[in-house]
Amino acid sequence: MTTNILVIYLSIVSLIGLLAIWWARSALIKIKSNRSERVRKLDNFDSIETSAPDDSSGFAEIDAAVGNIENRFSIIGKVTVFLIVTVWTIALAFPFLNSIPAALVSTLVAISSVVLGIAARPLIENIIAGVVISFSKAVRVGDTVVIDEHYGTVEDISLNHTIIKLWNWKRLIIPSSKMLSKEVLSLTYHDSYIWVHIAFYVSYDSNLDQVKQIAIESVQKSENFSSNEMPGFWVMEMEKDAYQCWIAGWTNSATKAWNLASDIRTGIAMQFQSNGIRAHSFGVDISPHSLKP
């Protein structure tokens, strides 16, 4: 390679390297700011409405989450810059590789592969998965989710693990490498609106008009109901001993969805008891005369 070509090559590689570092740092700062601002707007990390024993815990959790986001993206930024500089250095040194003994290069590559492949494999897997999750919008700090039938709120995402604050305030800690492969039901991914539906049964001798009215009123009377539209009522199945009915209504948050579902069940159960409505038609006669042969 002639001197002029070498100078042009090194200049282009240097420019590309500087632009890559500038772009990566700018992108990371923007993402970090957006994530921190979003968390700041959250009221708390509770997946159901409750009062904390410590009144300041909600603000402390939000501050801690913002701090964790900043620390995480600071580490990602340093790792990203290191990788860019490493690739940049290799690219700059590429024209001079012919002067390095091939045996030395092969030895260094072999040693590096063994160390990374055996000793640091779990750590590297978690870090890579943590970086992928960090840039993904599928799971974000503050989202209300259901994972492995556990209902809670994403409290923290680090490079090594994701912490889910469950509805009972226990913490579910999932390694990043496992979190990346899990199916997640997000209740707040696109928006916070949820159509809550409850299934229940009534006997065939029940007045369906009355049942429908009771079910609809149980939704409308709840303070957690968002009156975007009238509650929906359907007879879903006609089983052997009863109708299977659904009642559904809108609410505007996962926390309210939990409470709305409870309000609907409670309202229907209380009204069924008051009006003598049975849940099924099947009955067993245990009077003395029924036991005679």
Image (cartoon, rainbow, N blue to C red):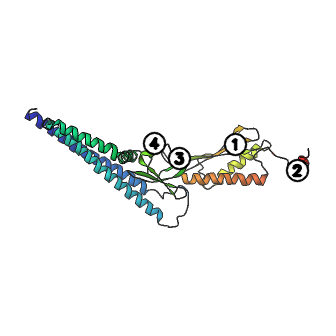
Q: CA distance from mark 2 to mark 1?
A: 32 Å
Q: Quadrant of residue 88?
A: top left
Disc sitting over residue 77 in the figure: none
Q: Does 174 sit left or right of 75 as displayed?
A: right
Q: Which residue is mark 4?
A: 181
Q: Amino acid at mark 4?
A: Ser
Q: Secondary structure at mark 1?
A: strand
Q: Secondary structure at mark 4?
A: loop
Q: CA distance from mark 1 to mark 3?
A: 27 Å
Mark 2 residue crowding within 10 angstroms, few (<14) / some (14–19) / many (20+):
few
Give the mark toward the camera: 1 or 3: 3
Give the mark toward the camera: 2 or 1: 2
Quadrant occupied by the N terminus: top left
Q: Which residue is mark 3?
A: 148
Residue at 24% from the left image edge and 40% from the top image edge: 109
Residue at 70% from the left image edge and 41% from the top image edge: 244
Q: Amino acid at mark 2?
A: Ser
Q: Does 68 sit left or right of 260 as displayed?
A: left
Q: CA distance from mark 4 to mark 1?
A: 36 Å
Q: Earlier in the sequence, mark 2 or mark 3?
A: 3
Q: Which residue is mark 2?
A: 287
Q: CA distance from mark 3 to mark 4?
A: 12 Å
Q: Which residue is mark 1?
A: 245
Q: Earlier in the sequence, mark 1 or mark 3?
A: 3
Q: Earlier in the sequence, mark 2 or mark 1?
A: 1
